[in-house]
Amino acid sequence: MKKYILITLLIFNCLNTIAQNHQIKLKPNTKIFDPNKFTGIGIFKIGIDTNVLMAYAEKNVEDIVDCNDFSELQNKRVSNITGGRLELIRLKTADSGSIGADVIQSYCPFVTQYVLTAYKINGDLIITNIRLTFFKNSLVKFESDYDKLIEDALTVKYGDGELKVTETKSSCYHNLTGITTPLIAKEYSKEWYNGLITVYSDLFESYDDNCKKEIHTFFLYSVENKLWENCESSGLDKSIKDGNSPKIKKSELNNF
């Protein structure tokens, strides 16, 4: 028994010595919110309601219009502040019988979305084609065209973002030779964090059917919100279920 106790004490002392020599470094808690860090751009802070948006629109935009057709929305996009009308567009889901595709792109009934064709911060910094997502009248997501000035401004104010490079296998098929060329699509993103808020400055390289490289860029920030995410998930499940359910009524099958 004494021998067993002695061995146990020796093991305990050994483990204690190792623990003292190799202190465990805890990872910083990235969920801590810092009010001095990124919370949004201009008036578009995470959590604002649509009253803030409407107050801005009343003083600054030329028109407030509705849109439920994707091609119509594409026509309203601007390349700069002089390239089109400064509008606030309320996005609506197309009716089930409508030819136009849905433009709201949400399966949650508590989501509303708007597009602001341009927003001037200061000087030369103009953000174009902003898409705003509100969940229960609270801003949860901001998307826009990419502009190097946005990334530069974030870097100056909040420091370098975390660079992430993601590679995806791709390929294209040459009709004349019958040869398939393996390719790599790459995504480069700079990310900043503040608690549950994540900011992305993104560039995506892909290839079309002719092996021609295509460059897509965008900028967005959003907040982690489980209620919103669960609402989208359950709405998607319902949409899939409804889409797979028979569209014929039983009463119509009397002569079937």
Image (spheres, rainbow, N blue to C red):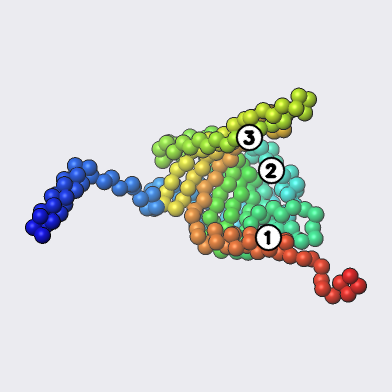
* Screen quadrant of the N terminus: bottom left
Q: Residues within 10 Å of mark 3 (few under 14, many from 20)?
A: some
Q: Residues within 10 Å of mark 2 (few under 14, many from 20)?
A: many
Question: Which callout, 2 or 1, points at the residue further toward the start of the chain?
Answer: 2
Residue in view at x 50 percent, y 58 percent: 225
Label 2 SS: loop
Label 2 vs label 1, nearer the camera: 1
Q: Amino acid at mark 2?
A: Arg
Q: Position of residue 177 (x, y in %)?
A: 76, 24
Label 3 SS: strand
In the image, taking residue 110 as reference, residue 24 lies left or right, namely left
| Residue indicated by mark 2 | 77
Q: Nearer the viewer, residue 67 or 97?
A: 97
Q: Residue at the top extreme? A: 177
Q: CA distance from mark 2 to mark 1?
A: 30 Å
Q: Is residue 200 visible?
A: yes
Q: Nearer the viewer, residue 67 or 28?
A: 28
| Residue indicated by mark 1 | 240
Residue in view at x 50 percent, y 60 percent: 226
Q: Is residue 150 visible?
A: no
Q: Nearer the viewer, residue 196 or 142?
A: 196
Residue in view at x 49 percent, y 55 percent: 224
Q: Nearer the viewer, residue 105 or 71?
A: 105
Q: Amino acid at mark 1?
A: Ile
